[in-house]
Amino acid sequence: MNSTIGVDDFFEGAEKVLEVWYNLSGKDLRSISRNDWDEILKIIGAKIMSTYSTDTMDSYVLSESSLFVWPDHFLIKTCGVTTLLSSYPLISQIIAKSYSLPELTQFYYSHKSFTRPDSQFHPHQTLDQEKKFLNQHFPNGNWHSFRHNDSKSEWSVFTYIAELKCARVGNDISTEIMMYGLSTNCLDIFSRNTYKNPELDMRVCSKMGDLLPAAVLDDVLFDPYGYSVNGNMCSTYFTIHVTPQPSCSYA
């Protein structure tokens, strides 16, 4: 999503997604410090660009997608060649030092197949690398892969649910939509060069505020192109990330 995309203008829009739930005996994950999150994101290869908080959720727009933190779970989405899984050992250390007897109750990791997997870094270059990494931490976890008969794209999901007597199973529902081959008119909306006043004019042109009118938008229009937005409303949110290069458009 940033300007350091590469000489051929390619950028991997497909996002790695990590969601982890905990039983913290009434404690709150939002007490993790900004410095700790910065260190976690440094390992991933991302940084915080903007933040917004509601009474129940902290929202971060990243240089590569988004981070959301609730009292009992967090969700990180990162695109490009970020190394999301590599951050998990540090996350575990921070959780262990910050809370008394924390219990991990659910762990989810997923991503669509990458357009250029060879450009990824360890442990994301192959599914076997990812499986080996995750099986070291969660030997009882499960891998699932989904592919439409006529599609070259595959959706891979790793799940682990702890067998705890008092484990609270999260019941939130999320919907994810992935789009390719966006029209030129659509792509131009997310380029700074289209506007005299990019941040203001782009919001008006894209009608981003109409998606969830009551939500507070926290967004970044990257230079020279690319866009990320977190729409925040209490504990409800939406997040959109647009890679508008014609050769690899993705949203």
Image: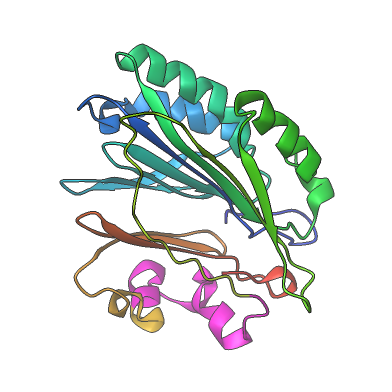
Q: Is residue 91 left or right of residue 142?
A: left
Q: Do we see residue 125 in this rendering?
A: no
Relative to 25, does residue 73 appear above or below in the rendering?
Answer: below
Q: Is residue 224 left or right of residue 55?
A: right
Residue depicted at 59% across the width and 54% down the height: 15
* Position in image of residue 168 (x %, y %): 31, 39
* Position in image of residue 215 (x %, y %): 23, 66
Relative to 243, does residue 180 appear above or below in the rendering?
Answer: below
Q: Is residue 138 left or right of residue 167?
A: right
Q: Is residue 198 magenta?
A: yes
Relative to 251, does residue 58 appear above or below in the rendering?
Answer: above
Q: Is residue 188 magenta?
A: yes
Quarter of the figure that contains the C terminus? bottom right
Residue depicted at 80% across the width and 55% down the height: 116
Magenta-tinted stretch:
180-203
Residue depicted at 77% across the width and 76% down the height: 149
